[in-house]
Image (cartoon, helix red, strand yellow):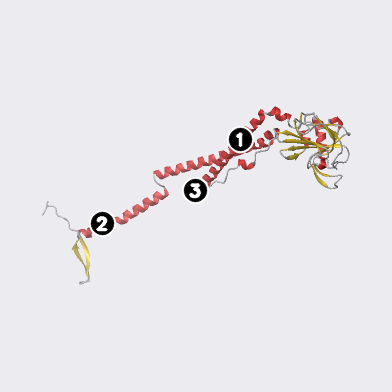
Amino acid sequence: MEGRNVKRKRYVYRFNPHTLSYERVEATWRDRLRRAVTTVLPGVVAGIGVAFALGSLIGSPEERMLRAEVREYRAALETLNSDVSQAQRVLADIEERDSAVYRTIFGAKPVAEGRRRPLAGDYSRWEGKASGALIAGTVQKVEELEQRLYSQSLSLDEIYRMAGTKRERMARMPAIMPIAKQSCRMVSGFGMRYHPILHYRRMHTGVDLSAQPGTPVHATAEGRVTTAGRGEGLGGYGICVVVDHGYGFKTLYAHLQDVKVSTGQRVSRGTVVGTVGRTGLAQGYHLHYEVIQNGQKVNPVYYFFNDLTPEEYDEVLEASYSENQCLS
């Protein structure tokens, strides 16, 4: 038999229940398949498990690339969020100057805070998403910044228009004392004061300037007379004059001895509108003078800047703050 290929037989052992012993029999293809499966399958399963574990811990190249991109996007979003916050701070400074400087110069009302705030948005679509809170916060900041920039743009347009009428506006802004400074004395300022006739403390909405009876009283800016005499609802003021200067300004001159103008008359700064008296609820001869800006009575001393030196203005301002009894 030498030199001939002999097919090697494969055997398996099976238990014979009749003889109660294992017998060697020739293996069938099913036996061979079963043996192969039982030998190879554990290795395959183990290999798959190891691959899955490594993939979860390390990730595929595509997953690693995606994670790197996500980190880059998050860093860029955080930088954008920081930049938007900085832009908000710069805009807040511009808004403050708009209200406290630009509009004060022209005597205009500050921009309503509600105009600078957007309506509440719906950011629920970002909930539960990766970096959802950061994205929602940034979107909200950007929307608020857009609204505030739009409002500020409108405000600057308005200031630009006001600047175009600066000469006329300044002519209509109260800017002098209603009585020549050498002919009067500040006796009571703006604020809570004790009333000499009513005998209780109440808001004194103007300043009292003591002067000799008959002393001329001057209009403090250009405007139109709306009241000349005893006006309706102005009984306590006695004989008075009210001038509407436009641009939100009005002035009132009370307790006059007589008037020198008529209702509807146009007056200029310096025009004599009446003389000092003591009509109405007044004690002693004096002028009660008020400045009304956009419907609010304000301290008239702030508008005595045209004909006083800095030293004189400081003296008048200090006198106006003194807590004393008013004359009306």
Q: Nearer the viewer, residue 242 or 106?
A: 242
User: How crowded is the residue under tag 1: few (<14 C-alpha within 10 Å), some, or many (20+)?
Assistant: few
Q: Is residue 255 left or right of residue 151?
A: right
- Return the residue at label 3: 125
Q: Which mark is residue 308?
A: none
Query: Which of the two discs, 1 and 2, sits closer to the camera?
Result: 1
Q: Mark 1 belongs to which amino acid?
A: Leu
- Return the residue at label 2: 36
Please name the residue shown 44% across and 44% down the image. Answer: 67
CB within 8 Å, label 1 to label 2: no
Residue 162: name its quadrant: top right
Q: Nearer the viewer, residue 321 or 3?
A: 321
Under circle 2, the secondary element is helix
Under circle 1, the secondary element is helix
Q: Mark 3 belongs to which amino acid?
A: Arg
CB within 8 Å, label 3 to label 2: no
Residue 94: name its quadrant: top right
